[in-house]
Image: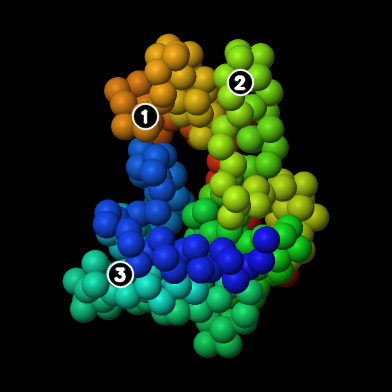
Amino acid sequence: MQTLDVKSYWDTFWENRAIPGSQNDRLFQELSIQAIIRLLKPDDIALNVGCGDGYGFDEYCSIVKKITGMDYSVEAIDKANEIHSDLIDVGKAEFIVGNLLEIQPELLEKFDVVISERCLCNLDTEEKQKNALLIIAKYLKPKGLALICEPSLQGYDAIDKIRQRLELEPIKRHWHNVLLNEDMLTELEPFIIQERYTFGVYTLLSRLFYPLYIHPQEPQFDNDINKIASILCREIMTEPQYKNIPSQHTLYILRRVD
Protein backbone atom coordinates (compact mmCIF):
# COMPACT_ATOMS: atom_id res chain seq x y z
CA MET A 1 0.00 0.00 0.00
CA GLN A 2 1.34 3.39 -0.99
CA THR A 3 0.70 6.82 0.48
CA LEU A 4 -0.48 8.01 -2.96
CA ASP A 5 -3.25 5.40 -2.86
CA VAL A 6 -4.42 6.74 0.50
CA LYS A 7 -4.41 10.32 -0.78
CA SER A 8 -6.43 9.27 -3.82
CA TYR A 9 -8.90 7.58 -1.50
CA TRP A 10 -9.37 10.77 0.53
CA ASP A 11 -9.57 13.01 -2.54
CA THR A 12 -12.40 10.83 -3.86
CA PHE A 13 -13.98 10.61 -0.41
CA TRP A 14 -14.16 14.38 0.03
CA GLU A 15 -15.28 14.95 -3.54
CA ASN A 16 -18.28 12.68 -2.98
CA ARG A 17 -18.97 13.27 0.73
CA ALA A 18 -22.48 14.67 1.15
CA ILE A 19 -22.45 15.14 4.94
CA PRO A 20 -19.91 16.88 7.21
CA GLY A 21 -17.17 14.94 8.99
CA SER A 22 -15.14 11.91 8.05
CA GLN A 23 -16.39 9.23 10.46
CA ASN A 24 -19.46 7.05 10.15
CA ASP A 25 -19.62 6.78 13.93
CA ARG A 26 -20.67 10.40 14.45
CA LEU A 27 -21.20 9.87 18.17
CA PHE A 28 -17.55 8.93 18.61
CA GLN A 29 -16.32 11.83 16.49
CA GLU A 30 -18.31 14.23 18.67
CA LEU A 31 -16.95 12.50 21.78
CA SER A 32 -13.36 12.89 20.65
CA ILE A 33 -13.89 16.58 19.86
CA GLN A 34 -15.34 17.13 23.33
CA ALA A 35 -12.33 15.39 24.89
CA ILE A 36 -9.96 17.63 22.93
CA ILE A 37 -11.65 20.94 23.71
CA ARG A 38 -11.27 20.28 27.44
CA LEU A 39 -7.54 20.74 26.91
CA LEU A 40 -7.71 23.98 24.91
CA LYS A 41 -7.24 27.48 26.32
CA PRO A 42 -8.55 30.91 25.22
CA ASP A 43 -5.09 32.21 24.28
CA ASP A 44 -4.12 29.15 22.25
CA ILE A 45 -3.01 29.40 18.64
CA ALA A 46 -3.81 25.93 17.32
CA LEU A 47 -3.12 23.75 14.30
CA ASN A 48 -5.32 20.82 13.25
CA VAL A 49 -3.41 18.46 10.94
CA GLY A 50 -5.48 16.26 8.66
CA CYS A 51 -8.42 18.59 9.32
CA GLY A 52 -10.60 17.31 6.47
CA ASP A 53 -13.61 19.58 6.04
CA GLY A 54 -12.99 21.23 9.42
CA TYR A 55 -15.53 19.20 11.35
CA GLY A 56 -15.28 20.34 14.97
CA PHE A 57 -13.98 23.81 14.14
CA ASP A 58 -17.09 25.52 15.54
CA GLU A 59 -16.31 23.90 18.91
CA TYR A 60 -12.57 24.58 18.70
CA CYS A 61 -13.10 28.22 17.76
CA SER A 62 -15.41 28.71 20.73
CA ILE A 63 -12.31 28.20 22.91
CA VAL A 64 -9.07 29.10 21.11
CA LYS A 65 -7.83 32.44 19.83
CA LYS A 66 -7.28 31.06 16.31
CA ILE A 67 -6.94 27.68 14.60
CA THR A 68 -5.36 26.67 11.30
CA GLY A 69 -6.56 23.56 9.51
CA MET A 70 -4.17 21.71 7.21
CA ASP A 71 -4.93 18.81 4.89
CA TYR A 72 -3.23 17.39 1.81
CA SER A 73 -6.57 16.98 0.02
CA VAL A 74 -7.53 20.06 -2.00
CA GLU A 75 -11.10 18.76 -2.08
CA ALA A 76 -11.21 18.69 1.73
CA ILE A 77 -9.82 22.21 2.07
CA ASP A 78 -12.28 23.53 -0.52
CA LYS A 79 -15.12 22.10 1.55
CA ALA A 80 -13.65 23.51 4.77
CA ASN A 81 -13.37 27.00 3.26
CA GLU A 82 -16.98 26.82 2.12
CA ILE A 83 -18.44 25.40 5.34
CA HIS A 84 -16.51 27.70 7.70
CA SER A 85 -16.46 30.96 5.76
CA ASP A 86 -17.95 32.75 8.79
CA LEU A 87 -15.04 31.68 11.03
CA ILE A 88 -12.56 32.70 8.35
CA ASP A 89 -14.18 36.12 7.90
CA VAL A 90 -13.78 36.97 11.59
CA GLY A 91 -10.17 35.73 11.74
CA LYS A 92 -10.84 32.70 13.96
CA ALA A 93 -9.88 30.06 11.39
CA GLU A 94 -7.91 29.49 8.22
CA PHE A 95 -7.37 26.43 6.03
CA ILE A 96 -4.28 25.53 4.04
CA VAL A 97 -3.27 22.69 1.74
CA GLY A 98 -0.22 20.91 3.12
CA ASN A 99 1.33 17.47 3.53
CA LEU A 100 2.19 16.58 7.13
CA LEU A 101 5.30 14.74 5.95
CA GLU A 102 6.69 17.89 4.31
CA ILE A 103 7.86 20.69 6.61
CA GLN A 104 6.00 23.97 6.07
CA PRO A 105 8.59 26.63 7.06
CA GLU A 106 5.97 29.27 7.82
CA LEU A 107 4.51 27.02 10.55
CA LEU A 108 7.69 26.41 12.57
CA GLU A 109 7.24 27.07 16.33
CA LYS A 110 4.02 28.93 15.65
CA PHE A 111 1.49 26.96 17.69
CA ASP A 112 0.62 26.36 21.33
CA VAL A 113 -1.35 23.24 20.41
CA VAL A 114 -1.35 20.82 17.48
CA ILE A 115 -4.33 18.47 17.10
CA SER A 116 -4.28 15.18 15.21
CA GLU A 117 -7.66 13.49 15.18
CA ARG A 118 -7.41 10.29 13.08
CA CYS A 119 -4.73 11.79 10.86
CA LEU A 120 -1.60 9.77 11.69
CA CYS A 121 -3.42 6.48 11.12
CA ASN A 122 -3.64 7.37 7.42
CA LEU A 123 0.14 7.24 7.05
CA ASP A 124 1.09 3.83 5.73
CA THR A 125 4.09 2.98 7.94
CA GLU A 126 5.03 3.46 11.56
CA GLU A 127 8.18 5.25 10.42
CA LYS A 128 6.10 7.86 8.59
CA GLN A 129 3.94 8.30 11.68
CA LYS A 130 7.08 8.90 13.73
CA ASN A 131 8.39 11.42 11.18
CA ALA A 132 5.04 13.21 11.21
CA LEU A 133 5.16 13.51 15.00
CA LEU A 134 8.67 14.95 14.79
CA ILE A 135 7.41 17.56 12.33
CA ILE A 136 4.48 18.31 14.65
CA ALA A 137 7.06 18.97 17.38
CA LYS A 138 8.74 21.53 15.10
CA TYR A 139 5.43 23.35 14.64
CA LEU A 140 4.94 23.66 18.39
CA LYS A 141 6.28 26.42 20.55
CA PRO A 142 8.57 25.18 23.35
CA LYS A 143 6.46 23.32 25.96
CA GLY A 144 3.54 23.21 23.51
CA LEU A 145 1.03 20.35 23.48
CA ALA A 146 0.29 17.79 20.80
CA LEU A 147 -3.19 16.30 21.25
CA ILE A 148 -3.07 12.99 19.42
CA CYS A 149 -6.42 11.19 19.17
CA GLU A 150 -5.82 8.08 17.12
CA PRO A 151 -6.88 4.44 16.79
CA SER A 152 -4.58 2.33 18.94
CA LEU A 153 -2.98 -0.95 17.90
CA GLN A 154 -2.95 -2.15 21.51
CA GLY A 155 -6.55 -1.00 21.99
CA TYR A 156 -7.89 -2.77 18.91
CA ASP A 157 -6.06 -5.96 19.84
CA ALA A 158 -7.43 -5.90 23.40
CA ILE A 159 -11.03 -5.35 22.29
CA ASP A 160 -10.79 -8.01 19.58
CA LYS A 161 -9.57 -10.56 22.12
CA ILE A 162 -12.67 -9.91 24.20
CA ARG A 163 -14.91 -10.04 21.11
CA GLN A 164 -13.38 -13.38 20.17
CA ARG A 165 -14.28 -14.81 23.59
CA LEU A 166 -17.82 -13.54 23.07
CA GLU A 167 -17.94 -15.09 19.58
CA LEU A 168 -18.14 -11.70 17.88
CA GLU A 169 -16.28 -10.91 14.67
CA PRO A 170 -13.13 -8.73 14.94
CA ILE A 171 -13.67 -5.02 14.47
CA LYS A 172 -13.13 -4.00 10.87
CA ARG A 173 -9.72 -2.47 10.22
CA HIS A 174 -9.72 -0.14 7.24
CA TRP A 175 -7.20 -0.86 4.50
CA HIS A 176 -5.93 2.72 4.55
CA ASN A 177 -5.27 2.78 8.32
CA VAL A 178 -2.10 1.85 10.22
CA LEU A 179 -3.04 1.73 13.89
CA LEU A 180 -0.83 3.77 16.18
CA ASN A 181 1.64 1.68 18.18
CA GLU A 182 1.80 3.21 21.65
CA ASP A 183 5.30 1.79 22.21
CA MET A 184 6.57 4.20 19.56
CA LEU A 185 5.33 7.20 21.56
CA THR A 186 7.23 6.25 24.71
CA GLU A 187 10.56 6.63 22.93
CA LEU A 188 9.82 9.76 20.91
CA GLU A 189 11.98 12.78 21.63
CA PRO A 190 11.35 15.71 22.10
CA PHE A 191 7.99 14.63 23.53
CA ILE A 192 6.91 13.20 26.83
CA ILE A 193 3.50 11.61 27.34
CA GLN A 194 1.96 13.99 29.86
CA GLU A 195 -1.32 12.05 30.05
CA ARG A 196 -3.42 9.55 28.13
CA TYR A 197 -7.14 8.87 28.13
CA THR A 198 -9.02 6.06 26.46
CA PHE A 199 -12.64 6.06 25.36
CA GLY A 200 -13.09 2.70 27.03
CA VAL A 201 -16.55 3.26 28.50
CA TYR A 202 -17.90 4.07 25.04
CA THR A 203 -16.01 1.17 23.44
CA LEU A 204 -17.16 -1.45 25.96
CA LEU A 205 -20.82 -0.47 25.58
CA SER A 206 -20.88 0.22 21.83
CA ARG A 207 -18.55 -2.55 20.61
CA LEU A 208 -19.26 -5.30 23.16
CA PHE A 209 -22.55 -4.87 25.04
CA TYR A 210 -24.61 -3.47 22.15
CA PRO A 211 -23.59 -6.09 19.52
CA LEU A 212 -24.33 -8.87 22.01
CA TYR A 213 -27.66 -7.31 22.95
CA ILE A 214 -28.98 -7.11 19.37
CA HIS A 215 -27.34 -10.28 18.01
CA PRO A 216 -27.85 -11.55 15.30
CA GLN A 217 -28.89 -8.13 13.97
CA GLU A 218 -26.22 -5.89 12.46
CA PRO A 219 -25.09 -3.02 14.74
CA GLN A 220 -25.92 0.55 13.75
CA PHE A 221 -23.86 3.49 14.96
CA ASP A 222 -26.77 5.81 15.72
CA ASN A 223 -28.64 3.90 18.41
CA ASP A 224 -29.84 4.67 21.93
CA ILE A 225 -27.26 2.48 23.68
CA ASN A 226 -24.39 4.21 21.88
CA LYS A 227 -25.90 7.60 22.71
CA ILE A 228 -25.99 6.71 26.41
CA ALA A 229 -22.46 5.28 26.16
CA SER A 230 -21.26 8.57 24.68
CA ILE A 231 -22.78 10.58 27.53
CA LEU A 232 -21.29 8.29 30.18
CA CYS A 233 -17.86 8.32 28.57
CA ARG A 234 -17.79 12.10 28.25
CA GLU A 235 -18.58 12.50 31.94
CA ILE A 236 -16.19 9.97 33.47
CA MET A 237 -13.39 9.23 30.99
CA THR A 238 -10.87 11.41 32.82
CA GLU A 239 -11.51 9.76 36.19
CA PRO A 240 -8.48 7.65 37.25
CA GLN A 241 -10.45 4.42 37.49
CA TYR A 242 -11.86 4.76 33.94
CA LYS A 243 -9.15 6.46 31.88
CA ASN A 244 -7.25 3.27 30.98
CA ILE A 245 -10.10 0.90 30.05
CA PRO A 246 -9.25 -0.81 26.72
CA SER A 247 -10.50 1.22 23.79
CA GLN A 248 -10.20 1.40 20.02
CA HIS A 249 -9.00 4.99 20.32
CA THR A 250 -6.75 6.81 22.74
CA LEU A 251 -6.12 10.51 23.34
CA TYR A 252 -2.42 11.09 24.01
CA ILE A 253 -1.35 14.42 25.47
CA LEU A 254 2.26 14.96 24.41
CA ARG A 255 4.32 17.88 25.64
CA ARG A 256 7.35 19.21 23.80
CA VAL A 257 10.11 19.34 26.39
CA ASP A 258 13.26 20.50 24.57
x, y percent for residue 124? 67, 60
Mark 2 vs mark 3: which is more N-terminal?
A: 3
Residue furthest out toward the right: 187
Distance from label 2 to label 3 (Cα)? 38 Å
Q: Report which residue position mark 2 lands on.
A: 163
x, y percent for residue 92? 29, 72
Q: Amino acid at mark 3?
A: Lys
User: In the rendered image of this protein, does residue 72 appear above or below residue 233?
Assistant: below
Mark 1 vs mark 2: which is more N-terminal?
A: 2
Distance from label 1 to label 3 (Cα)? 27 Å
Q: Front-most of 137 and 183?
A: 183
Q: Amino acid at mark 1?
A: Gln
Work out which quarter of the rendered image holds the C terminus and state it. Answer: bottom right
Please identify, in this view, whether the residue under mark 1 or under mark 3 is nearer the observer.
1
Dot label at residue 79: 3
Local crowd at mark 3 within 10 Å, few (<14), some, or many (≥20)? some
- Residue drawn 39% across the image and 44% down it: 24
Q: Report which residue position mark 1 lands on.
A: 220
User: In the rendered image of this protein, does residue 65 appear above or below residue 212?
Assistant: below
- Asked if one can make out residue 45 in the rendered structure from this viewpoint, the answer is no
- Asked if one can make out residue 237 in the rendered structure from this viewpoint, the answer is yes
- Residue drawn 65% across the image and 52% down it: 178
Q: Are marks 1 and 3 in contact (CB under 8 Å)?
A: no
Can you tell which quarter of the image residue 126 is in? Answer: bottom right
Q: Front-most of 234 and 117?
A: 117
